Amino acid sequence: MESKIASLRSWLDGLHEEPFDIQDDTDLIQSGAVTSLQFVQMVIEIERLHGRKLDPGVITIESMRTLKAIDTAVFQAA
């Protein structure tokens, strides 16, 4: 079974026509991996993978900035 972070990485890869190297510590915002509109879509995808809505306090720029931060704030915190 694919991990939630691997699934999210695949989803992010699908946003780009050209290959986009997204490491666990890639700044998703600064690198251009996600736009502001895609950020909202990414939160929805994270909720889908997580299986429930996220507490609004979890959805911060810092907790959503990298795959590692998302894993810590959302998937490992569950």
Image (cartoon, helix red, strand yellow):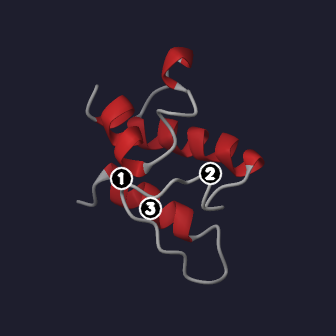
The disc labelled 1 sits on which kind of residue? Answer: Ile
In the visual, does 33 lie left or right of 2?
right
In the visual, does 40 lie left or right of 23?
right
Residue drawn at x 65%, y 56% as measured from the top left: 34
- For mark 1, what is the residue? 5
Q: Disc 2 versus disc 1: distance between alpha carbons?
A: 17 Å
The disc labelled 2 sits on which kind of residue? Answer: Ile
Badges 2 and 1: C-beta atoms under 8 Å apart?
no
Residue 44, percent from left and from top: 59, 39
- For mark 3, what is the residue? 9
Q: Which quadrant is the C terminus positioned in?
A: top left
Q: Disc 3 versus disc 1: distance between alpha carbons?
A: 6 Å
Q: Earlier in the sequence, mark 2 or mark 1?
A: 1
Q: Which quadrant is the N terminus positioned in?
A: bottom left
Give the label on residue 29, or none. 2
Q: Is residue 67 above or below residue 11?
A: above
Q: Is residue 76 above or below residue 31?
A: above
Residue 8, percent from left and from top: 45, 55
Provide the secondary structure element on which disc 1 rests.
helix
Of tags 3 and 2, the one toward the viewer is 2
